[in-house]
Amino acid sequence: MNRIPPMQISETFDRVVVVNLARRPERLERFWNLLSDWPFKKPERFDAVDGEAVGVPAGWDKGPGAWGCLMSHRTLLDRAIADGVNTLLVLEDDAIPAANFSELAAQFLHNVPDDWDGLMLGAEHLLEPEAIRFGVVRCVAANRSHAYAVRGRFMKVLSQFWHNTTNDHCDIVLSSLMRHFKVYAPDPLLIGQDVGHSDITGRREYLRFLNGEQKETIASADPRYLIEKLVVRVSLNNSPRTAQYDARQVQA
């Protein structure tokens, strides 16, 4: 198991990037304002490929937003590989960390197995993940690309698959590789996706991929999230999948 001293948390990832379209400066400003409790390196802004501007190739039917997303993530990954980066954390500008993020991230990194190929700090589990230990699950099939980390050989394999895909969202490709690589996620998740207009779906999205308690904490401090106070929370969304593990294992 990893044993990362607190003073080394900032060095967990060789490079941290945030993907942002030049025409969406308001999202980047919001993102920077959320990083007061951030334990890793300051993210470098990556100028996202604008699918609306570059157009899509023949045969692509997922829309220009999804094409720009794929091109952005593929390009930044290829650049990291070329630069000799071994561990890469990728964020999108609608990422929203849970309260007490630094403490929770340190706890997760303390408990995650040290054989990880990828980490999904934020995700949507398409299939039920495997409980590993308290606060840690292994992803079976999980999509979303707003907060993930990759390292080592997995970076090159993911790049190859992103180059070879002809009509799939980048996060679906990432998800398809999880049966062959060790990809873990915190339980509950630590980074959600914020409210606002999505350049992928073309519609307004609500706060997603955090549990009910996490959403309520955010809503209590920001009136934009009033709807989160009105939504009925279901027990499945509140109870960690690893709740059966004794909490003392966090420090094991």
Image: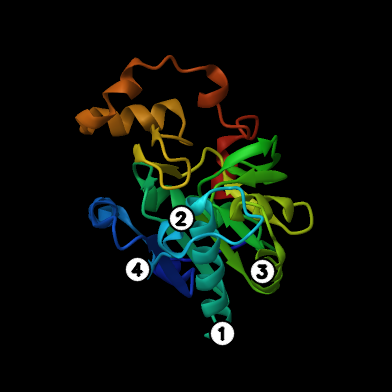
Few, some or many residues within 10 Å of mark 4 (<14, 14–19, 20+): some
Q: Residue at x 71, y 66 (%)?
A: 164
| Disc 3 to disc 2, C-alpha distance | 33 Å
Q: Which mark is residue 82?
A: 1
The secondary element bearing badge 4 is classed as: strand
Residue drawn at (57%, 31%) of the image: 240
> Marks 3/1: CA distance?
15 Å
Determine the secondary structure under disc 1.
helix
- Label 2: which residue? 106
Q: Position of residue 121 (x, y in %)?
A: 51, 50
| Above or below for 42 versus 136 | below
Nearer the observer: mark 2 or 1; the answer is 1
User: Could you give the CA–CA distance between mark 3 and mark 4, rounded to whole angstroms?
Assistant: 22 Å
Q: Amino acid at mark 1?
A: Ala
Query: In front here: 3 or 99?
Result: 99
At x 54% / y 57%, what residue is drawn?
67
Of residue 220 and residue 123, the one placed in the foreground of this image is: 123
Disc with the residue nearer the chain's start (3 vs 4): 4
Identify the residue position indicated by label 4 in the image: 45
Tell which circle, 2 or 1, labels the residue nearer the N-terminal end.
1
